[in-house]
Amino acid sequence: MMKALIGKKIGMTQVFDDLGRVIPVTVIEAGPCVVVQRKTGEHDGYEAVQLSFGEKKRANRPTIGHYKKSGAPAGRILNEFHVDPDETTLQPGSRLTVSIFNPGERVKISGKPKGRGFAGCIKRWGFSGGDETHGCNSHRAPGSMGCASTPSRTFKGRKLPGRMGSRRVTVRNLRVVQIDEERNLILLRGAVPGARNGFVTIEGIGG
């Protein structure tokens, strides 16, 4: 069965394992998610399902009509996940909860961090900066581009000042520490991209 959910980041805390060791965890309110649409290779050219999370306070008529087949109210977040062609249990109206995950399982999670605006190399990439001495004029400058007459250009991928944050980030191999089915909570070891109350997607990767 496909293991994927949409959730909201609550924040970070810590729990203790059986040996009394401290484990930093991120608490996420995941699901319940409703299957809004099932896409097939025969009709749409690929296999996927659309999952909805939350509820919109106001929705226009096209949005309400899209959700009508599933019998669910218009969701606040709508994401699409690829599935295997032989996955037939996920049909419009099906509900997915945190119970699809198990403690010890590995997942990948995607979110969008806060936008930081235009940032320099020190803030954006962690550059050490220039000398803090008298006569130095490049305290926070990026420094040499590394190219002279050959090839007379800056290589692609060079770390330079630019817009920071507000882009989708994926972190893999986070371990599920605890599951709280009653409150729809999942605790993942370590940090998760995004701000508090930001929306994230969780996908199982096995192991």
Image (cartoon, rainbow, N blue to C red):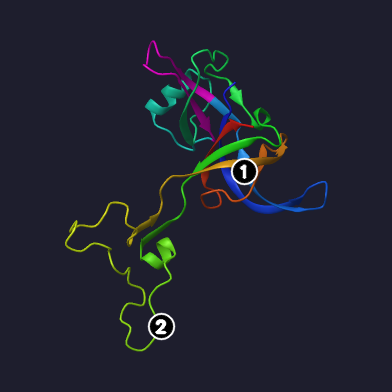
**Helix, strand or loop status at disc 1:** strand
Disc number lying in front (2 or 1): 2
Residue sitting at x 79%, y 47%: 17
Can you give x and y, in whole percent of width and height, for residue 3 in the image?
58, 28
- Identity, as a three-letter code, of the amino acid under mark 1: Ile
Q: Nearer the viewer, residue 81 or 78?
A: 81
Please determine whether, in this image, residue 5 is positioned above or below residue 117: above
- Identity, as a three-letter code, of the amino acid under mark 2: Glu
Can you give x and y, in whole percent of width and height, for residue 100 in the image?
65, 28
Which residue in the protein does label 1 denote?
28
Residue 158 location, quadrant: bottom left
Graded by Cα atoms within 10 Å as few (under 14), some (14 to 19) or many (20 or more), the crowding at tag 2 reads: few
Tell me: 152 left or right of 128: left
Report the quarter where the N terminus lies: top right
Q: CA distance from mark 2 to mark 1?
A: 43 Å
Can you give x and y, in whole percent of width and height, for residue 167 in the image?
40, 48
Tell me: 148 left or right of 129: left
Can you give x and y, in whole percent of width and height, for residue 141 in the image?
32, 72
Residue sitting at x 60%, y 24%: 95
- The answer to if 112 sits in the magenta stretch is no
Residue at the far bottom in the pictured view: 134
- The answer to if 45 sits in the magenta stretch is yes
Report the quarter where the C terminus lies: top right
Which residue in the protein does label 2 denote?
132
* Disc sitting over residue 111 in the figure: none
Residue 30 location, quadrant: top right
Q: Nearer the viewer, residue 185 or 73?
A: 185
Residue sitting at x 78%, y 53%: 21
**Helix, strand or loop status at disc 2:** loop
Q: Which residues are magenta?
A: 35-54
